[in-house]
Each structure stands twice: as structure tokens, then as C-alpha cells.
Image (cartoon, rainbow, N blue to C red):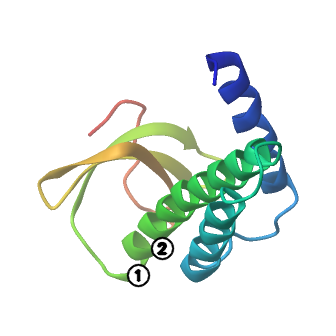
Amino acid sequence: MTAPLIARLAIVAALPLLFLSQLPSAAAIVGIALAGGLLLWMPRSPLRIAGVALLLAWMLGSARSGIDAVETASAVPAIYSVRIDEVRASRQQIKVQLIKKEGRYLFPLRFAWLTLREGEQHYCLGQR
């Protein structure tokens, strides 16, 4: 397989993500990957279809892990180091970049919107 063919397959595999209202569960992602694996036993012509199915399962898994990280971050209180990225004075909201969680750096970068209470301290961009 050439690099342009792999790139095309990745684009085609990502298209169903546009139509999903929510990401499937981990079990459904495993099912998709198994179905893609079963397609590998077919004759040569459907191998591209199997590649697309496997790429779709990989993309769904990556998206699911990102969503899971956000859901677990909001489920339990923790101490974060943040950098203010945007301030909306009219709505009393700030957008923060999460840098560290309890002393450990976060990767990939995550952002959160925080709503300020009336009379709280004012913040400015770049403040940590």
C-alpha cells in the first residue's frame, strides 16, 4: 500500500464520524475491529474495505479515549494548573488551558470553560 492510498482510506474511514450523534461504546468499537479482522479472510478485492473498517475502529477508539478523559476529569474534583486563554467579560466566563493535573502534565492539551460568580476576581489573558 502506498502513502496516498492509506491517506485516502483514512479520510474515507473518518466520514462516518460526521453522522454519529455520539461515539459508540468500547464494546462496539471492538466489534467493529473484529468485523474488520474477519474481512481480512475474504478474497483480495475486499482488503481495502477491511482497511477502512480497521481505520474506522482506530479512529473511534482515539475519539472515545479523548471523550473518556474529559468525562473522568469532570467526574472527580482535582487540582489543576491552568493558563487563561480567553476572557468573556459580558458572560463572566473564562476559557482555560489545562496544563497539569495534580502535578502531572496533560497531553494532548485540553481546554475548559469556567463560569465566574458575581463579584469574583477579574482575570486576564495568559495569567496562570
**Which SS class for mark 2?**
helix
Q: Which mark is residue 27?
A: none
- Amino acid type of the residue tagged 2 in the rendering: Glu
Q: Is residue 35 above or below residue 94?
A: below
Tell me what residue is drawn at x 62 percent, y 18 percent. 3
User: Which quadrant of the figure has residue 108?
Assistant: top left
Tell me what residue is drawn at x 26 percent, y 40 percent. 128
**Which SS class for mark 1?**
helix
Image coordinates for residue 29, horizontal then vertical, percent: 61, 71
Identity of the residue furthest to the right in this view? 19
Image coordinates for residue 103, horizontal then vertical, percent: 11, 54
Q: Nearer the viewer, residue 89 or 52?
A: 52
Image coordinates for residue 56, horizontal then vertical, percent: 68, 53
| Residue at mark 1 | 75
Looking at the rendered image, the quarter that the N terminus falls into is top right
| Residue at mark 2 | 71
Tell me what residue is drawn at x 71 percent, y 52 percent. 50
Q: CA gap, disc 1 to disc 2?
A: 6 Å
Q: Nearer the viewer, residue 25 or 117?
A: 25
Q: Are marks 1 and 2 in contact (CB under 8 Å)?
A: yes
Camera sees residue 87: yes
Camera sees residue 14: no
Graded by Cα atoms within 10 Å as few (under 14), some (14 to 19) or many (20 or more), the crowding at tag 1 reads few
- Amino acid type of the residue tagged 1 in the rendering: Ala
Is 63 left or right of 72, judged from the image as shown? right
Q: Nearer the viewer, residue 112 or 53?
A: 53
